[in-house]
Image (cartoon, rainbow, N blue to C red):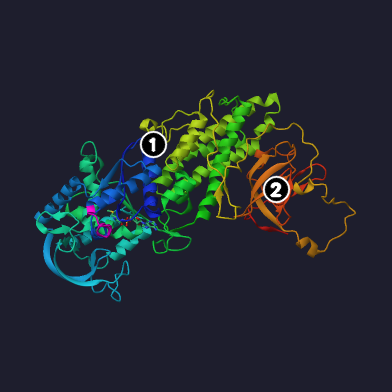
Amino acid sequence: MAATFYITTPIYYVNDVPHIGHAYTTIAADVLARYHRLRGDDTFFLTGLDEHGQKVQQAAGKAGIDPQAYCDGMVPRFQDIWKRLTISNNAFIRTSQPRHKEVVQKLLQQLFDKDLIYRADYTGWYCTFDERFWTEKDVVDGLCPDCKRPVDRLSESNYFFRMGRYQDRLIAHIQAHPDYIRPRSRCNEVLGFLQNPLEDLSISRPKARLSWGIELPFDRNYVTYVWFDALVNYYSALEYLVPTPSVERYWPATLHLVGKDILTTHAVYWSTMLMALDLPLPRTIFAHGWWTVNGEKMSKSRGNVVDPNAMVDEFGADAFRYFLLREVPFGFDGDFSRVALIGRTNSDLANGLGNLLSRTLTMIERYAEGRIPAEEETTNVEVDNLLQQEARGLPGVMNIHLGNLDFHRALEAIWSLVQIGNQYIDKTAPWVLARKPENKARLNTVLYRAAEALRFISLYLYPFMPQTAEEVKRQLGLTVNFAKPALAGDIDGTITWGGLLPGTEITKGNWLFPRIDTTTAQGGPRVTHEQQPTTPSMPSTQPAAAPVSAEAAPPAAPQITPATPQITIEDFQKIQLKVARVLTAERIPRSDKLLKLQVDLGGEQRQIVAGIGKKYEPEALVGRRVVIVANLKPAKLMGVESQGMVLAAGDKEVGGLVTILEDVELGTKVK
Ligand code: MSP
């Protein structure tokens, strides 16, 4: 059922350039916004910039320009990267906008009039970096408990918000609304924090110390504390950043996404501010974890800050989006590394999804004249049932996982369908069906079903990887408009199997994801377009005699005959056998028996030329586990380097590949 969905990201301090942390929350919010729009919900997605406060004033001072000009100059950095990451925010708020200031002043005045803001002298420890006071018990060894920088003793007359007054009400609200602060562990942290007396909050800064802020409406000598100003953005945007004021339409917010470090300001300051203003509280505040980089804290001084622009340049927005939400459960801390991103891109995107699309469309081109064939059979075959069940179950599964902000599970569910789709093709072997005209009905059915599974995939992929979903849609010839609520009702529960129209012309395009070559030693892995699997060639009709492997092709290949002398265990141990998985397979031009394989040895990729092309069509090998000789001296076969040998049974003819039954890790030794 359609509902309103109002989602926010934190507003980012304008004195920093966008990094992976900013991108993470914003991408997560974008996925949810797109998903809710797809469901037909009235969605409002807000992000923006936090422009006031000491940090910005200092940064502007350093740059020798006025703070407003400094902020104006920084804004495009954020807006540009959000565009590149295909962020679909409905509005972009800047706290230096006059209308925002008006709302902040209006609310301050309301609280002042209700005597919920009062003036008092205060002596405490002040942390300039965090722009806040700490009490004696908070400070450890003269350092700020938060950022660990030295604090200064400061006596000041300031204005205070009677936050402490709301302590019991806040505890009661959190306890009565288990979804208010999530995940559960963070909720418990907040409840723990609230076991100590909640003090009133200093919401002013004397202008003498800080001028870059919103002036208190009741005392011109002060500006308001940057957090009071910033938190109000979630509300003020609804008064002026929408075509018509929409407080009634969208408030309370459905979801504030924040990082774990700023949970207290949201769960305690913002909640009590809203209580004091008699405004309803948001439905959920969700705190996600932090990224480290190659196991280390990310920081400018370490020089390891992950720049989302560089990620988009190198991997594309969708691969980066996919990685961030697939790699780590939302709510947990995670570690970012290029190696992990490359691993996922190669295995899940290139090998899984890219391969499914490419082989399905190639076969439709070859066996169905480039048009979606009709599902001519109503079969009750196990593989077909499995595929359909998995696809039909997807809408419900997505609903549950995205409702819980379990992005990684939602992606796992989509990829389970990708995997089942690939297995479906392996098992039904359309290239074998195509050999006999009497199999035409079955062939058409299989091709239809593979394509229909891809339609389901594209729909649910859209929130996560909008550009990829559009490309799948284009290649499949679909006409659906993902961004339009016309899908409402279609997607939730009623999306039915069989929606793909037979006769639709497909447009096979480029590979969705270029495989990244991990073997390039110098300069690290690089994206290469050379190693894409080619389209499957027309299947040969008869398997004929073929040497087994790359090694068997050269004339010098040893022949194992009964007369072969016995070897010692030490001799055998010289041969390094390992489990590998075929990533791609393609025919070597002008050879009917040689296939070029890329195999994954568990973090290491190898190219192997194998003489199995008369027994196997390349597309039937992708994803298979094989055993390879890993320490064979590289050799060139028809000009193509082979870095190992695949084991197969058979003497003159290939009987079958040696595989491994259990799901052992790639690279495991075989002895
Ligand atoms: N301006 C405040 C928010 C005000 S919201 C009313 C602010 N801005 S920030 O730019 O410093 O941080 C924004 C967000 O980036 C926070 O949610 C923070 O958790 C997140 N991250 C900063 N570094 C991060 C990582 N290394 N990993 C994940 N997120 C991180 O705070």
Q: Is residue 481 left or right of residue 70?
A: right
- First in residue order: circle 2 vs circle 1: 1
597 or 353, nearer to the observer = 597
Identified at 40% across, 55% down, the residue is 331
Q: Where does residue 56 sit, x and y in percent of width and height?
A: 26, 57
Circle 2 crowding by C-alpha within 10 Å: few under 14, some 14–19, many from 20: some
Identified at 28% across, 46% down, the residue is 253
Q: CA distance from mark 2 to mark 1?
A: 48 Å
Q: Is residue 379 visible?
A: no
Identified at 28% across, 57% down, the residue is 63
Q: Is residue 331 visible?
A: yes
Quadrant assignment for ligand 1: bottom left
Q: Where does residue 356 sit, x and y in percent of width and height?
A: 57, 38
Q: Is mark 1 within 8 Å of ligand 1?
A: no
Magenta span dominant secondary structure: helix
Quadrant of the rendered structure where residue 464 is? top left
Numbered badge on residue 641: 2
Q: Is residue 221 left or right of residue 571?
A: left
Placement of the C terminus among the 4 image quadrants: bottom right
Q: Where does residue 394 sit, x and y in percent of width and height?
A: 48, 40
137 or 46, nearer to the observer = 46
Q: Which stretch is magenta?
A: 59-67
Q: Which residue is tagged 1?
A: 38
Amino acid type, label 1? Leu
- Secondary structure at badge 2 equals strand
Amino acid type, label 2? Glu
Query: Residue 173, relative to residue 369: is it above or below?
Result: below
